[in-house]
């Protein structure tokens, strides 16, 4: 039932009478209401409109209008603060035609207004929705990005033209809408469905990469599989269920093609690098093998020249002065020629070593491999290596220790002796080379010291990049950190300011005349700098033209415990030579070498020094020979002959064997396999004690040397080598 409020107002706006419905509708005061009090409860936005209609009615015109009353939300029970009413008012006139009062009714039309407003708003919302759908449709149709919609059953409901073009190519849109999954590559379809089922179970979005059956063609004619990345998102309804799926596709075919091309180029680069390293290794091997024979022959001739000198003096007395001079000239010429051969061979070997090291540095593959060593042994090796060569060119070589290396709880340290020696060899070689031409006193001094912190050397260190060497790995041990420093001082020609700025650069020497006068590749100091920095150190120099130079460096190492039963000897002094007179003990040596020239030359030199030498052409022959020695246990349950079959001699095992010189690369059985077999026989008790094995290889790469050590060899030496370099290794292992 709709309330209708009846009212009557006097012309001055005073309410004369009204029913209950009017009071409820308008909240008009029931008592003591002033004239025009009806205006107080009219909605502010409608007040002007109501006053105009009141004025018209007061002028004698019937009016009908809609208006709103202010109503408290507490009264209405909702958030709306107004009440709609439809008002009909008529003027009441007297006989003279004057308006004496206004009568009318007000009907509550709030419900109708709300329904009308709801209908309007819904119509507006529907219009907006239609406009939004139209915009979305236009966007998807014109978008370059493929867009698609699937229902909850994973049936395609919508896709734009870009989707059809990408998925189907020349296939019609109807065919794509019917079953677009048929266009996915058969090998990738199961994984795609599995990924989608997982996203469905977990109510999450998914991203998956797959191939289509059609091929991709690039702008430059390149072809390959059509690769697609699909990003699909679930539409969740009010009940939390998936009502559909919407997503986009991205064509990544060109990216995949570029990745494949990059991968192929990377593989080609790696292969090219491998072939380059193989070429360098092969070249090194082919150079080192004959060079070894050259060095051994030259050393043999040099030793013979010493004996020839004594004989020459004996026969010279019976010769005429002319014949005597001719013979002495021949002797001196031959002596100089042999020294030249040795010098050139040594120089060529160092060039090969530098090239190998540079190759590793250039590939960022060079690693520091620590081992326990006595620092004083480094100085002893330098003395043994260079003392004779220095004396031949009139240079005095002094080797000394400073700061008491053996008194700072570091008689043994963990370092890479090969890399350290490479730096020292470069520096000492340069010092002798640039000092031998001087007319004044010619001295080269090598000093070594240790500190617990970075040493303060009187040198200008070369700026270096920060090198982080992992010295916390188990192979370094847990000893304290120690800094070893070396200084090589000479009284040579020195360096000018211009020459100082050029050294330590790759393929660069002090000046063009340096190569012309002294030779060299310009790699030595560059490699030395790199090797020092790899060991957390720095290298520097000080020099004055015409006075001499100091080159020095330091490296960071860890102290190591002394081996049990190992005394710490002091640094020895005195001349070392490769002649038989310098050999204090005779050894029984097995030379395992497939190159018969190298085998014969090396054996001859060792025999000339008084050693007993046995030979084997490969690893299998070496194993056969071992059973003829005292090291082989005659009572072994499984004779080696059953394993290798061979040509052993049953001579009551009377042959001594102190050390084996094992070539690495040999036919039938290589040195690595042979060494591993020897160690296995030792573990099984078929060989008594420990047979020292020194690897002899023309491949000087650290990897092969490490592999040789890993197979059971005790030490390694690279071809070409001189007997003076080999004997300290034998003495250290056998002694």
Image: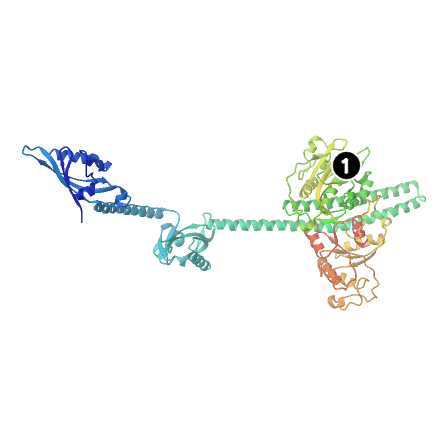
Q: 331 left or right of 71?
A: right
User: Closer to the camera, 406 or 573?
Assistant: 406
Where, by quadrant of the figure, is residue 201 drawn?
bottom left
In the rendered image, is residue 221 in sight?
Answer: no
Where, by quadrant of the figure, is residue 687 drawn?
bottom right
Colour convention of the picture? rainbow
Q: Position of residue 684 (x, y in %)?
A: 74, 64
User: Closer to the camera, 540 or 87?
Assistant: 87
Q: Residue lying furthest front in this view?
A: 31
Label 1 sits on residue: 489
Q: How many marks?
A: 1
Q: Position of residue 290 (x, y in %)?
A: 74, 51
482 above or below 668?
A: above
User: Closer to the camera, 115 or 262?
Assistant: 115
Q: Residue at x 78, y 39 (%)?
A: 403
Q: Position of residue 710 (x, y in %)?
A: 70, 55
Callout 1 secondary element? strand
In the rendered image, is residue 122 in sight?
Answer: yes
């Amino acid at each position: 039932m709709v309330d209708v409020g009846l009212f009557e107002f006097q012309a001055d706006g005073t309410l004369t009478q009204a029913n209950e419905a009017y009071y409820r509708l308008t909240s008009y005061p029931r008592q003591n209401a002033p004239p025009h009090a009806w205006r107080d409860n009219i909605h502010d936005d409608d007040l002007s409109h109501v006053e105009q209609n009141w004025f018209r009615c007061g002028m004698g015109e019937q009016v009908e209008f809609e208006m709103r009353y202010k109503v408290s939300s507490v009264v209405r029970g909702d958030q709306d603060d107004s009440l709609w009413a439809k008002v009909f008012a008529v003027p009441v006139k007297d006989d003279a035609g004057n308006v004496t009062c206004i009568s009318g009714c007000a009907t509550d039309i709030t419900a109708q207004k709300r329904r009308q407003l709801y209908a309007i708003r819904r119509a507006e919302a529907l219009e907006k929705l239609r406009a939004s759908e139209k915009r979305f449709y236009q966007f998807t149709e014109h978008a370059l990005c493929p867009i698609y919609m699937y229902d909850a059953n994973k049936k395609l409901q919508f896709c734009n033209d870009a989707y059809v073009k990408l998925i189907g190519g020349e296939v019609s849109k109807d065919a794509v809408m019917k079953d677009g999954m048929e266009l996915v590559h058969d090998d990738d379809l199961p994984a795609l469905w599995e990924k989608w089922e997982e996203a469905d179970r977990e109510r999450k979005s998914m991203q998956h990469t797959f191939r289509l059956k059609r091929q991709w063609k690039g702008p430059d004619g390149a072809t390959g599989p059509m690769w697609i990345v699909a990003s699909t998102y679930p539409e969740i309804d009010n009940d939390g269920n998936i009502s559909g799926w919407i997503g986009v596709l991205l064509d990544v075919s060109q990216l995949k093609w570029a990745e494949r091309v990059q991968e192929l180029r990377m593989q080609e680069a790696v292969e090219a690098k491998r072939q380059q390293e193989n070429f360098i290794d092969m070249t090194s091997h082919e150079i080192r093998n004959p060079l070894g024979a050259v060095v051994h022959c030259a050393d043999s001739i040099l030793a013979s020249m010493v004996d020839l000198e004594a004989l020459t003096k004996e026969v010279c007395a019976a010769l005429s002065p002319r014949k005597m001079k001719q013979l002495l000239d021949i002797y001196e010429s031959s002596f100089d020629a042999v020294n030249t051969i040795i010098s050139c061979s040594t120089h060529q070997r160092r060039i090969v070593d530098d090239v190998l090291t540079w190759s590793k540095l250039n590939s960022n593959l060079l690693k520091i491999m620590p081992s326990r060593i006595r620092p004083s042994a480094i100085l002893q090796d330098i003395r043994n290596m260079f003392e004779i060569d220095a004396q031949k060119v009139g240079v005095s070589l002094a080797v000394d220790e400073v700061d008491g290396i053996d008194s700072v709880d570091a008689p043994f340290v963990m370092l890479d002796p090969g890399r350290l020696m490479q730096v020292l060899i470069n520096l000492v070689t340069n010092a002798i080379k640039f000092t031998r031409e001087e007319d004044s006193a010619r001295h080269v001094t090598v000093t070594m010291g240790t500190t617990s912190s970075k040493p303060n050397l009187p040198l200008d260190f070369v700026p270096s990049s920060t090198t982080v060497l992992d010295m916390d790995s188990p192979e370094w041990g847990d000893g304290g950190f120690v800094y070893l420093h070396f200084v090589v001082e000479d009284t040579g020609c020195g360096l000018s300011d211009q020459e100082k700025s050029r050294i330590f650069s790759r393929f660069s020497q002090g000046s063009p005349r340096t190569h012309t006068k002294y030779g060299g590749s310009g790699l030595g100091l560059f490699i030395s700098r790199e090797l020092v920095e790899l060991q957390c150190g720095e290298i520097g120099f000080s020099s004055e033209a015409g006075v001499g130079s100091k080159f020095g460096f330091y490296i960071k190492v860890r102290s190591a415990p002394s081996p049990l039963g190992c005394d710490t000897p002091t640094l020895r002094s005195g001349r070392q030579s490769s002649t038989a007179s310098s050999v204090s003990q005779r050894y029984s040596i097995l030379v395992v070498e497939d190159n018969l020239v190298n085998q014969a030359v090396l054996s001859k030199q060792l025999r000339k020094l008084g050693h007993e030498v046995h030979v084997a052409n490969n690893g299998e022959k070496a194993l056969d020979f071992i059973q003829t020695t005292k090291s082989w246990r005659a009572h072994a349950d499984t004779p080696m002959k059953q394993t290798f079959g061979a040509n052993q001699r049953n001579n009551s095992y009377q042959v001594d064997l102190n050390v084996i010189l094992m070539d690495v690369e040999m036919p039938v059985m290589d040195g690595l396999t042979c060494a591993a077999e020897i160690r296995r026989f030792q573990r099984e008790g078929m060989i008594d004690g420990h047979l020292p094995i020194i690897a002899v290889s023309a491949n000087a790469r650290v990897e092969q040397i490490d592999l040789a050590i890993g197979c059971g060899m005790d030490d390694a030496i690279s071809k070409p080598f001189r007997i003076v370099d080999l004997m300290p290794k034998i003495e250290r292992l056998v002694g």
